[in-house]
Image (spheres, helix red, strand yellow):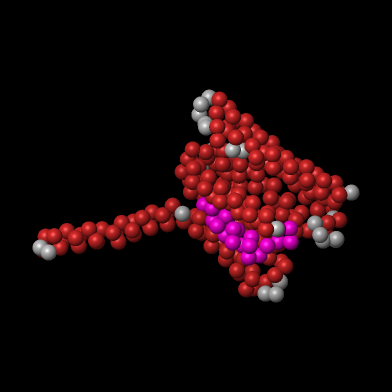
Amino acid sequence: MSSETYQNASNRLAVYPRGFARTLKSLLKKELCTLLFFLLNTGALVGWHLCIGSGAENNYSVVRKIISIVFHVVPIVTVTFLYLMKKIENQLFTWLLGISRGYLLYDIPMMYLFPGMEDSVWSNILYTLHHIVFFTITYFSSKYAKYIAMGLLSEISNIPLNYVLVFQDDVVVSNTLLFKLMCIALLLSYFLFRVVNFCVLEVWMMQKYRRGKATMLEAVLLLPLCCMNFYWFFRLIEGAIKKLS
């Protein structure tokens, strides 16, 4: 091999580490928010286990719900409102969707490692599919940012929902005024932010389809979710009537 050929080969080989480093740096910068919130959620659960949770496996479901509120619902709803109020731009909103991506990456294995009393294998499979689909959708936020933001408003209903799920079997708490108010808040927030909200999104997508700005798949994508929201809303009404009576 001539010295020139050897030099060219060496130069090409030297490019690969530099190219990989640039790609890794770019990926880390893009997904820093995802990584941060994955570590926050995981660290909170591990920290609780190390400090308090030893021998209290039945409390993992409750802790997971608290972590969901603190490290996912509150920050992502805040970001969503700021975006819808045009306080932050589309690029920043897309990056901050890493809040949800980090939580989803954390929650999928935790559903199977520490299932709650209300969890079943089938429900965990459905939640896993939901997490994977939404995780994928967040990477198309440049096209669907407004729709994703509107959909994320549904997270508001998770605050009273998690409270009710945690204390519904507690004889003392479930008879308090606060619990009953949370049941009412759950029904109202679920109806507004899941039933009505997703129906409005579906109407918008149908209108886009009629104008030729969306495909048929995009137009009907939310229909199953709308039907599911109606089903669970009526189930919630049944449960609330029993509790409030």
On the image, which quarter does residue 109 sit in? bottom right
- The answer to whether residue 80 is above or below residue 165 is above
* Vertical side of 90 occupied by 102: above or below: below
Find residue 63 and report its horizontal and vertical position in percent. Answer: 68, 63
Q: In this view, does 1 lie above or below 97?
A: below
69, above or below 215, in the image: below
Q: Residue at x 58, y 27 (%)?
A: 207
On the question of residue 82 being in view, the answer is yes
Left or right of 8, for residue 223: right
Q: Quadrant of the N terminus?
A: bottom left
In the shown orientation, is residue 84 left or right of residue 28?
right
- Asked if the stretch drawn in magenta spans residue 114, the answer is yes
The image quarter in which residue 107 lies: bottom right
Magenta stretch: dominant SS? helix
Q: Is 157 situated left or right of 171 in this image?
A: left
Residue 181 in percent (x, y) is at 80, 49
Q: How many labels does the image show?
A: 0
> In this orientation, does residue 63 appear?
no
Q: Which residue is drawn at 55% across and 38% down?
A: 146
Residue drawn at the location 65% of the way across and 40% of the way down: 224
Of the pair 232 and 24, the residue shown nearer to us: 232
Q: Position of residue 101 (x, y in %)?
A: 54, 53
- Asked where in the image residue 118 lies, by quadrant, the reply is bottom right
Residue found at x 52% / y 52%: 98
> Which residue of the protein is positioned furthest toward the right in this rendering?
245
In this picture, which residue range is highlighted in magenta?
97-119
Q: Is 195 colored magenta in this rendering?
A: no
Outermost residue to the top: 211
